[in-house]
Image (spheres, helix red, strand yellow):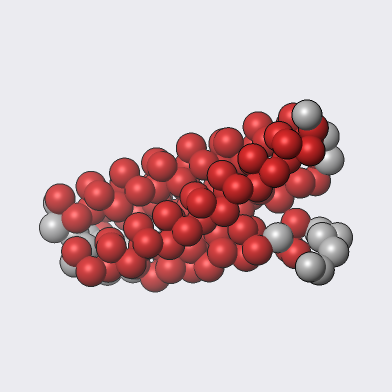
Amino acid sequence: MAEIRSYRDLLVWQRAMDLVVHCYEAVTNLPQAERFGLVSQIQRTAVNIPSNIANGHGIGITNQYVHHLALAHGSLMLLETLFHATERLQFLAPATVAAILQETAEVGRMLNGLMRSLRNQSS
């Protein structure tokens, strides 16, 4: 197992960054009227996930790290909700939303595993 020297070494951060790219790509064709609505909120929420992972890792205090990972997880749930909304509003194809939700599920599992590992280390 490789040594973690930076948040950039974390697989969960890498996957979250991939998710950011895919979210930006997915919303490029949403209606212009949603540019400052759903598009903006999806983009900000997606970027928030790896940002909180990096922030928590950078603090270096386990309980703060777990707190930031929990914030990232909350943003992940918000992102899922926003994509469900785009599907219900028929702004995105169900297949596009399903692909994003598959990625959010993977990042969610990884976040949960990292939080569990950190909590076990601090016990």
Q: Which quarter of the figure is the C terminus placed in?
A: top right
Q: Which quarter of the figure is the N terminus placed in?
A: bottom right
In the picture, measured across the screen, residue 82 lies left or right of residue 6, that is left
Q: Is residue 90 above or below residue 59?
A: below
Q: Residue 56's spot in the image, x, y percent?
A: 72, 41
Q: Residue 10's spot in the image, x, y percent?
A: 70, 60
* Residue 36 visible to the viewer: no
In the picture, measured across the screen, residue 13 lies left or right of residue 28, that is right
Q: Nearer the viewer, residue 103 or 114?
A: 114
Q: Residue 2's spot in the image, x, y percent?
A: 81, 68
Q: Residue at x 47, y 58 (%)?
A: 106
In the picture, measured across the screen, residue 80 lies left or right of residue 117, that is left
Q: Nearer the viewer, residue 106 or 90?
A: 106
Q: Nearer the viewer, residue 83 or 61?
A: 61
Q: Residue 44's spot in the image, x, y percent?
A: 48, 49
* Residue 70 visible to the viewer: yes
Quarter of image, res 9: bottom right
Q: Residue at x 41, y 42 (%)?
A: 77
